[in-house]
Every structure is written in structure tokens, then in C-alpha cells.
Image: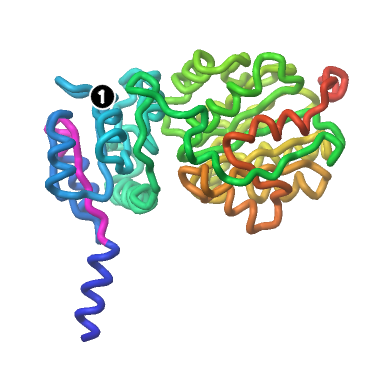
């Protein structure tokens, strides 16, 4: 009986994957990496986007891995069709040589995450890449996706039906006016950041610093995509540049972004650092520089980056706002901040911009420390 129960438990925990990749070489590498993980089963392999819907109906996988550069029906078209007809978590796996803006379009269409194509001969090695990919698949396969049609396919509400959650309002009188805002996100972050920044608008009276965990090679495209999709000025942060109200600074790859003396400082990571850029390091620097004048915002994402730095900021009087579970694609980072006691408010995505605006002073030009 115990053997039977063990077998049933293993079956319940098994992750069934549909792979869609037109390159024979990349397809073989990906399948090898996946099946190297115990409990992960590749139930079908599609070479064309047209095969995905029929394979979903036939094999009933838990998650799809999808290239965005496909012959015939493109990866973006496949995502649109899947999210409209057979919603399921989609992990986009794209080469760094591809167009990063297309990758951002894939996330906007409903893909839950994007990573670069694995390279067996990279410094990481086969084992490390297989484990990392397996861990990612296990997490993403549990993401609850909703059926929707994008605007070009029929449209959905401003924040979708998910915004029916109760929101705790933040009144300006609750705390002293704030002078700088930090936003942290991971899985699901590009869509969430787009929604929040679009609502903040070009007249937002404070600088905004963004840490988004994203695959290497896509940060530049992510910045361009945000700039075309939102009204504030969005730029890739440069070392030593002064912070200006109404400008969004996105942390670059392979550098931690902190604030010091009213300027952006980029620092190389230590070998032991888990994330780079790190929300913990950004929030800690904000706490040190402006104390109670900081707003730390933690949006959807895996892991716990931001929780420790937010605790340091809160101890200095900063406001910490975390996204609620209902509107989060992955409730890892917000949950970690909430459970650590760092969160001041829990707010749904649809009210996040309102909450940030309510907390920030209308006159911050002289509030930031002068460069030194």
C-alpha cells in the first residue's frame, strides 16, 4: 500500500512539459536538460506553432516552453491563441540574438517568464543549467493563468477581473511625504511595471528606480519596451548620473544599483550574491540616504529579494508597499516581505500607482540630497 501511495504522490508531483522549438539542435539540448530532472516529463515536442493547440488538447501538459522565432505562426501568435483558447503557463525560451522587444511583447501577450536559450558549453555547465531550468519549471507550472484576449483580439478590462480584490487605501496624511521610489519585481514584473508606470505619468514628482530580474540580453529591450508603453521617461541607469523627478531608472545587468548623494551608483556584484541587480541592496541604500523619505514597492516575483532591504528601510521610517496575492503572477517576493514584517500596506496591482502617488510629496526637487 505504501508503495502505491508513493507512486501516486510522485505522479501528482510530476511536471508534464510541451516543448515547441523549431531548431533541431536547440530542441535536443532543451529536452536533455528537462528530462535530467527527476519528476519532469516531456510529453510532446512541437516544431511548429500551429501544432501547439492540438498538442495541448491531446497531451494535457502542465506547462509549455516556447521559442518566439518560429516558422509559420509566430510565437507571439501562439501565445495569443493559447491564452484565449487553452490558458496554461508559458515559458518563452529565446536566443539572445533575437529581438528583445519581441520578447517583451511575449510577456505582454501572457507568457509568464522569458529566459535565454541554454548553452551546453557555457561556464555554468550542463548540471547547473538543468537544475536551474527544472526549478524554474516547477515554480512556473503552478502559476494560475487566466483566459483572456488581448486588446487586439477583443480586449479586456483596464486591470482585468483580477482587480476585484479589496484594496487598502493609502492617504497622504498617513506618513510624511516621500522623496524617492524603488520598485522590485521578478516573474510577471514586466506587465506589472508597465501597468504601474503608465499610471504614474510624466509628472510624477520623484525619481523611480527599478530592479527587474530578467534574463541576460533582454534588459535593453525591456527598457525600450517600457519607454514606448508608458509616459514617464525610462532609461537604463548610468553610473554617477543625478536622480531627477519623473525619470525611471532601470538597473542594468551585472551591476547592483544603489543611490548615494542624489546620484545613481553602479557596483559590481560579489561572487556570493544571489541576485544582480538586487532589490535588497537598492532598498538598503535608499534607507541609508533618505530614511523615512523612501517608498519601497515589491511586485510579483519568485524568491525573497527585497524583503531584507525593505526591513532596513522600514526601520528608518520608509513606506513599504507589496502587491497582493490575487493580482500577482507569482506571490514569492511580496509574500516574503509580508511574512518578514516589512510590509506597511498590501495593495492590488490596479491601485498600486494610486498608493505610490498618495505617498509621495508634490515638491521633491529640493528634498533629494545634493550630489557629493
Q: Position of residue 225 (x, y in %)?
A: 47, 18
Asked if one can make out residue 128 in the rendered structure from this viewpoint, the answer is: no
The residue depicted at 60 percent of the width and 24 percent of the height is 197
Left/right placement of residue 133 relative to residue 181 reads left
| Scheme by which the image is coloured | rainbow
Residue 69 part of the magenta-drawn span:
no
Q: Is residue 20 magenta?
A: yes
Residue at the image position 27 percent from the left and 46 percent from the top: 63
Q: Is residue 360 left or right of residue 211?
A: right
Number of residues whose C-alpha sits closer than 10 Å to that of mark 1, classed few (under 14), some (14–19) or many (20 or more): some
Locate residue 27: give its quadrant.
Answer: top left
Quick one: quadrant of the C terminus? top right
Q: Is residue 182 left or right of residue 58?
A: right
Instruction: Please give left or right for residue 18 compared with residue 171 in the image.
Output: left
x and y, in percent, of residue 110 in the image: 37, 33
Residue 66: x and y, percent?
A: 25, 34
Q: Quadrant of the N terminus?
A: bottom left
Q: Which residues are magenta?
A: 14-27
Does 117 sit above or below residue 335?
Answer: above
Q: Is residue 207 above or below residue 143?
A: above
Q: Position of residue 42 (x, y in %)?
A: 17, 49
Question: At x 75% / y 23%, what residue is drawn?
Answer: 206
Find residue 297 and report its image quarter. top right
Q: Residue furthest bottom?
A: 1
Element assignment for label 1: helix
- Res 203 visible: yes
In this rendered view, identify the residue nearer to me: 76 or 224.
76
Q: Which residue, given by chain and number where applicable, does mark 1 sit on?
A: 77
Tally of numbered tags: 1
Residue occupying image coordinates x 59% and y 14%: 231
292 and 171: which one is in front? 171
Amino acid at each position: 500500500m505504501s508503495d502505491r501511495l508513493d507512486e501516486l504522490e510522485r505522479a501528482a508531483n510530476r511536471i508534464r512539459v510541451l516543448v515547441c522549438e523549431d531548431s533541431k539542435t536547440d530542441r535536443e539540448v532543451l529536452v536533455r536538460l528537462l528530462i535530467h530532472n527527476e519528476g519532469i516529463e516531456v510529453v510532446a515536442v512541437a516544431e511548429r506553432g500551429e501544432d501547439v493547440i492540438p498538442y495541448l488538447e491531446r497531451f494535457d501538459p502542465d506547462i509549455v516552453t516556447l521559442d518566439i522565432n518560429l516558422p509559420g505562426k509566430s510565437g507571439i501568435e501562439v501565445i495569443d491563441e493559447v491564452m484565449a483558447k487553452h490558458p496554461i503557463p508559458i515559458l518563452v525560451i529565446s536566443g539572445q540574438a533575437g529581438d528583445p522587444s519581441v520578447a517583451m511583447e511575449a510577456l505582454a501577450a501572457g507568457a509568464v517568464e522569458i529566459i535565454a536559450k541554454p548553452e551546453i558549453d557555457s561556464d555554468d555547465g550542463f548540471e547547473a543549467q538543468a537544475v536551474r531550468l527544472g526549478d524554474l519549471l516547477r515554480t512556473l507550472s503552478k502559476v494560475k493563468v487566466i483566459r483572456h484576449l488581448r486588446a487586439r483580439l477583443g480586449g479586456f478590462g483596464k486591470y482585468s477581473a483580477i482587480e476585484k480584490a479589496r484594496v487598502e487605501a493609502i492617504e497622504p496624511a498617513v506618513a510624511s511625504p516621500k522623496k524617492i521610489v524603488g520598485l522590485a519585481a521578478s516573474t510577471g514584473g514586466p506587465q506589472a511595471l508597465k501597468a504601474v508606470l503608465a499610471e504614474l505619468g510624466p509628472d510624477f514628482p520623484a525619481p523611480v528606480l527599478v530592479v527587474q530580474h530578467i534574463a541576460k540580453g533582454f534588459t535593453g529591450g525591456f527598457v525600450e519596451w517600457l519607454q514606448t508603453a508608458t509616459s514617464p521617461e525610462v532609461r537604463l541607469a548610468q553610473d554617477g548620473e543625478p536622480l531627477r523627478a519623473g525619470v525611471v531608472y532601470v538597473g542594468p545587468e551585472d551591476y547592483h544599483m544603489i543611490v548615494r548623494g542624489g546620484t545613481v551608483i553602479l557596483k559590481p556584484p560579489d561572487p556570493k550574491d544571489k541576485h544582480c541587480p538586487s532589490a535588497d541592496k537598492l532598498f538598503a541604500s535608499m534607507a541609508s540616504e533618505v530614511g523615512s523619505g523612501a517608498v519601497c514597492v515589491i511586485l510579483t516575483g519568485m524568491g525573497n529579494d527585497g524583503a531584507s532591504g525593505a526591513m532596513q528601510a522600514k526601520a528608518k521610517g520608509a513606506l513599504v508597499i507589496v502587491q497582493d496575492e490575487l493580482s500577482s503572477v507569482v506571490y514569492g517576493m511580496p509574500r516574503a516581505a509580508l511574512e518578514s514584517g516589512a510590509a506597511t500596506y498590501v495593495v492590488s496591482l490596479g491601485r498600486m500607482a494610486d498608493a505610490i502617488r498618495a505617498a509621495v510629496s508634490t515638491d521633491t526637487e529640493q528634498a533629494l540630497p545634493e550630489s557629493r
